[in-house]
Image (cartoon, grey):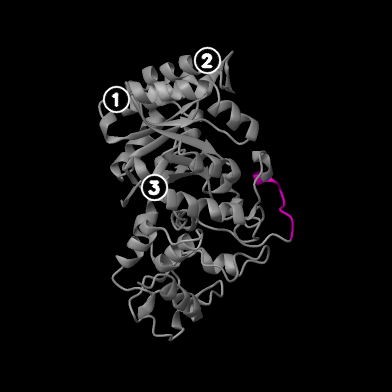
């Protein structure tokens, strides 16, 4: 298992994580079997947004005696009222639900305290301007949460959170299908049976969000990497082609700022299918060739998606990384000092390009890489 730094939290999390949602439909023994297998394979981060008492109890029992081996994302604002899940900013109800989470998880702290599910502007304003945020800060000050995060599906709200400086990390929905769509405050739009025909490439707001998170050191954990399983079925996929779990995971992990992909699991076998990513070949990880040739929805023609198809470079340049630093740099009127220092720390930089264009013949999206290397060298010249 590979581990990645989760932004300014400095936590080293497994790049394959555990999304707990599907555990709601399983008994304790089944939950424990999936969690045990995940731990055996090196997974160390688990998200529990669910407020249902049974699933919280089952996860807590499964983690008993090994709490210190896991980073837990626990949500503030996910409550259980009258036998059902209710999202709320009512502090009294949030307090009851969060104390319940601690008790059922058999712990006195949550690593990542997530401001739960903010997709609308009005909800964002209510959360940050009232007593709810005071409560979140109270939890942080008391040590009941170690870091403040937020979960959202809306890139516009996510950008507000990053720019506010409030959050250290974020749980965001990422997959090739969702990345086509413009910002929305209605999550059901992402699961529409059909997408409009003229969509092409990663939506600008989402691409800018990933770069902004990288620039501000706000780490991302990923929810819904499989788009609810629709990407596994060519008839339901908006691209008209099917992807594998490994390909979906690789897509997510090639987005800037992403540290961990929290897929959902029903069984130990589902865990193994995701962790197969760690030993997969480049060919098995290849989402780019499939999306570039998909019969529906042109994907990112002329734009670098950091997929790594351009390798190997005869000049030993890490082209995807150079392109990422270039994209981060041009977001600002002046090149940020941190971006420049990271670029200059590369062993082989853009000025090493020999202009052979061999990388361009391998790029599924037709990126003019040699030209970008020339622009990058000029941009970062000392």
Where does residue 329 sit, x and y in percent of width and height?
46, 62
Q: Residue furthest right?
A: 197
Instruction: Compare residues 336 and 37 and report the one nearer the observer.
Output: 336
Earlier along the polypeptide chain: callout 3 or callout 1? 3
* SS at mark 3 in the image: strand
Q: Residue at x 63, y 57 (%)?
A: 234
Tell me if residue 141 comes above or below residue 114 in the rendering: above
Q: Residue at x 37, y 63 (%)?
A: 340
Q: CA distance from mark 2 to mark 1?
A: 26 Å
- Residue under numbered circle 2: 93
Instruction: Compare residues 22 and 258 and report the one nearer the observer.
Output: 258
Asked whether residue 97 appears in the rendered view, the answer is yes
Q: From which residue to which does the magenta span run?
A: 190-197
Closer to the camera: disc 2 or disc 1?
Answer: 2
Tell me if residue 149 comes above or below residue 137 in the rendering: below
Closer to the camera: disc 3 or disc 2?
Answer: 2
- Residue under numbered circle 1: 64
195 within the magenta span: yes
Q: Quadrant of residue 67?
A: top left
Instruction: Compare residues 146 and 281 and report the one nearer the observer.
Output: 146
Earlier along the polypeptide chain: callout 3 or callout 2? 3
- For the stretch drawn in magenta, what is the main secondary structure? loop
Where does residue 88 sit, x and y in percent of width and height?
57, 22
- Residue under numbered circle 3: 16
């Amino acid at each position: 298992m590979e581990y990645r730094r989760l932004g300014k939290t400095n936590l080293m999390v497994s790049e394959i994580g555990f999304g707990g949602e599907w555990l709601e439909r399983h008994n304790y023994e089944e939950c424990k079997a999936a969690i045990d297998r995940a731990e055996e394979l090196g997974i160390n981060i688990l998200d529990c947004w669910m407020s249902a008492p049974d699933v919280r109890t089952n996860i807590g029992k499964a983690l008993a005696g090994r709490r210190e081996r896991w980073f837990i994302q626990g949500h503030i604002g996910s409550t259980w009222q009258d036998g059902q899940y209710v999202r709320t900013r009512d502090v009294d109800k949030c307090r009851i639900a969060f104390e319940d989470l601690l008790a059922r998880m058999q712990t006195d702290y949550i690593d990542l305290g997530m401001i739960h599910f903010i997709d609308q502007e009005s909800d964002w304003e209510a959360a940050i301007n009232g007593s709810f945020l005071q409560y979140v800060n109270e939890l942080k000050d008391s040590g009941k949460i170690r870091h403040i995060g937020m979960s959202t599906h809306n890139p516009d709200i996510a950008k507000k959170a990053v720019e506010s400086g409030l959050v250290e990390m974020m749980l965001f929905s990422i997959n090739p299908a969702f990345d086509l769509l413009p910002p929305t405050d209605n999550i059901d739009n992402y699961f529409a049976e059909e997408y409009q025909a003229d969509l092409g490439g990663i939506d600008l707001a989402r691409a800018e969000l990933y770069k902004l998170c990288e620039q501000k050191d706000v780490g991302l954990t990923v929810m819904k990497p499989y788009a609810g399983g629709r990407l596994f079925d060519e008839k339901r996929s908006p691209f008209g082609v099917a992807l594998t779990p490994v390909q979906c995971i690789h897509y997510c992990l090639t987005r800037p700022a992403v540290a961990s992909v929290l897929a959902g699991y029903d069984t130990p076998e589902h865990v193994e299918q995701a962790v197969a990513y760690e030993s997969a070949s480049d060919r098995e990880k290849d989402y780019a060739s499939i999306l570039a040739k998909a019969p529906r929805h042109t994907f990112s023609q002329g734009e670098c998606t950091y997929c790594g198809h351009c390798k190997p470079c005869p000049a030993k340049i890490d082209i995807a990384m150079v392109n990422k630093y270039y994209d981060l740099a041009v977001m600002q009127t002046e090149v940020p000092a941190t971006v420049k220092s990271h670029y200059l720390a590369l062993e082989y930089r853009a000025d090493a390009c020999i202009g052979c264009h061999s990388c361009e013949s391998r790029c599924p999206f037709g990126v003019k890489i040699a030209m970008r290397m020339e622009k990058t060298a000029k941009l970062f010249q000392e």
